[in-house]
Amino acid sequence: MKRRIAALLLALLATQLGSLISPAYACGCGAMIPEGYARIGVERETSVVRFDGRTEQIVMRFVVRGDAPRAAWIMPVPGRATVELGDGEMFRQLTWLTRPEYKTRGYFWPRDHDWPFSSTNGDSVGAALPGAPAVGVVGREQLGDFDVARLTATDPDALRNWLEANGFKLPDGLAAELKPYVDQKWEYVAVRLAPRQQGKPLTGTLDPLKIRFDSDRLVYPMRLSRLAKTPQSLGLYILADHRMEPASAIGGAEPKVTFAGEVTPEGGLAALTGGKPAFLTAIDQEFPEPGRIDGDHELRATAADTPYRKVIYQGELITVGGIPAWLLTLAAVLFALAVTAATAFTLRRRRSRTASA
């Protein structure tokens, strides 16, 4: 019965989004599904997560590639959700807050770009850095390019009758992956994506969406990524009271912390934290084989709020008064050798004269 509910629920989502769809790709925290035989893939998923112990907010942004003019995106959530457009400026602010620290590290011997190996004049160019019980439509909003439906389903028979009357066929793959969420009585955010310009394919960076729901634990849904056909890349910025970490790698590469430290958010980030300082943890993770993903990310506080910032060392030739130290050292060694040789020569001549006298 629960499997039937999962299957019928997914078909309902497809109907709410206005097209008959077939699964081809998934993104990190939901299913990205193109219309018909079109193709769409998520190259990068970046999300800002705010958790205060009671409420979780996720602002997510996708970079997509493909030829689909329309697509559906489905995300399971553990509680009743509200959805609105996110502020893209916060991602630029986060990039600045988590930027690496650049330090200079001196080196002694000249390298390829140093004299005498380089023929340049010294200039260099560097890279810049329940009311309706059977089929529940909790809410529906038009947010920019997004048609958002928030759904529940409790009566499989009503769903089946409705779907049969409308001629919809369920894709099997996503139905199996939805079953654990049905078992836990999660709800769903279903989004129809379509560019304002008719016929233009969905490609590039999409506008961010902000989803908010009550939760007693910090969870980031990932299970539907198992259906992805290409490697997935996930970036998470977590704003909480402490430094956070994933409980496990859930089948991906080991998560890498790229920043950890207390920050005072501004602008859109301040709206997430209520203007209060928060501990920011930035995590990157790769999923070379998405089919190995075995659950959702659950994030927990680390034993200590140890700060971390990536350090990038830039080499600089050691100089003394503008003269390379290696050159001064070489000159000193040559001078010392010359003095030693001259002294030895002088001593030999004196000995020779003494012997002949």
Image (spheres, rainbow, N blue to C red):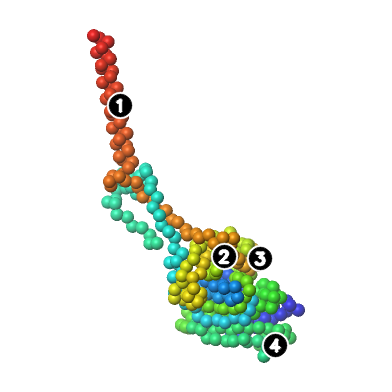
Q: Is 156 drawn above or below residue 343 in the view shown?
A: below
Secondary structure of residue under mark 4: loop
Looking at marks 4 and 2 on the same chain, the residue that comes earlier in the sequence is marked by 4
Residue beneath the point at 57% across and 86% down: 140
Task: Identify the residue at the far right of this view.
Answer: 1
Residue beneath the point at 51% across and 63% down: 260
Query: Who is closer to the viewer here, 349 or 168?
Result: 349
- Residue indicated by mark 3: 294
Secondary structure of residue under mark 1: helix
Q: CA distance from mark 4 to mark 2?
A: 39 Å
- Whether residue 243 is visible to the viewer of this picture, yes or no, is yes
Task: Identify the residue at the far bottom of this view.
Answer: 131
Q: Is 52 drawn above or below residue 256 in the view shown?
A: below
Q: CA distance from mark 2 to mark 3?
A: 20 Å
Q: Are marks 4 and 3 in contact (CB under 8 Å)?
A: no
Find residue 133 and report its horizontal and vertical position in percent. 69, 88
Query: Who is closer to the viewer here, 244 or 328?
Result: 244
Q: Are marks 1 and 2 in contact (CB under 8 Å)?
A: no
Q: Are marks 2 and 3 in contact (CB under 8 Å)?
A: no
Label at residue 244: 2
- Residue indicated by mark 1: 340
- Identify residue type, mark 4: Ala
